[in-house]
Image: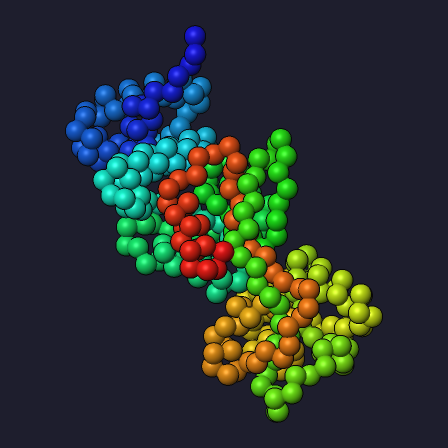
Amino acid sequence: MINRLNFHHLYYFWSVASEGHLTRAAERLHISQSALSSQIRQLETQLGTPLFLREGRKLLLTDMGVKVMRYAEAIFSLGNELLAATHDGDGWRGSTLRIGSVSTLSRNFLENFLQPVLASREVKLVLEAGDLDSLLARLGSYELDVVLSNRPVIADDKHPWRCRTLDRQAVFLVGPPRDGDTAPDLAVTLSQQPLIVPSAKSEIRVRFDLMCEQLGIQPRIHAEVDDMAMLRLLARDSGSLAVLPAIVVKDELDRGVLQLYAAVPGVEETFYAITVRKRFETRRLQALFDRFAAAGQG
């Protein structure tokens, strides 16, 4: 016999876990406390593990309870989205969008990508930053809907990732405003001026080092920075030249604090959206991809 999950029991568990209190959950559900407790015990029996610990009048989730709660949130959030999609053509109302972003990603790029969500009052945005491996682990356990990265991932049987290219940004040599309109000689500048560059883990740095090797340039590296936000600050405040996409320092360029010296040939940064290939992509997520592409940025 197939052991089927009782979603009625799961809904009661989700309600109690959300309230953190049995009495309040029972009142909201219009059910007696004893009946509600019985429903949860049946779910615990089916799953073979306790889901709650009592602390006074409060109910705390066990480690397994936390895990079950994450699945319950995803299940009922998708159900709410289904209802919303049948009542309006947008599919955004009542949505929760959980996005992971690698800590090295440009904040300006991230803000541009999230504009449709930020402009909507009907979408709850949960945004988490971290390293790619930890974010992928959360994506694989359905705790995130998508991971935004400036590094691609390779799918295999164990990791069924779908890696979508969102955008490509040219990389420039950026520095404080200079005198004159003549563009500096790139090879001479890279060899003589102190440079602030991304760390060796980044796609930009790999391509930059390859370009220098091919052109016989010995760049004068002053600092290597792993985080784009810090790279932006150093580009703005150090007086040194930086190697980065223009979008990272868009505000400084607009104010005239920094200036583009020259494009770095053959070097660009690619932005990726990573999802789980075997998982249904919600309408809200697909709409976000489509709107970003329609704006001419994808």
Q: Position of residue 40 (x, y in %)?
A: 32, 23
Is residue 161 shown above or below 52?
below
Q: Position of residue 192 (x, y in %)?
A: 76, 81
Across the whole image, how many numbered discs are drawn on residues?
A: 0
Q: To which quarter of the image does residue 238 belong?
A: bottom right
Q: Looking at the image, can residue 58 be seen?
A: no
Residue at (51% x, 42% y) in the render:
275
Residue at (53% x, 57% y) in the render:
167
Q: Is 24 left or right of 104, judged from the image as shown?
A: left
Is residue 261 shown above or below 114?
below
Q: Is 281 left or right of 36, judged from the image as shown?
A: right
Q: Position of residue 23 (x, y in %)?
A: 22, 32
Is residue 260 shown above or below 159?
below
Is residue 163 shown above or below 254?
above
**Most extreme residue toward the bottom, as rendered?**
179
Residue at (67% x, 70% y) in the render:
264
The N terminus lies in quadrant: top left
Residue at (29% x, 28% y) in the render:
12
Q: Looking at the image, can residue 263 be seen?
A: yes
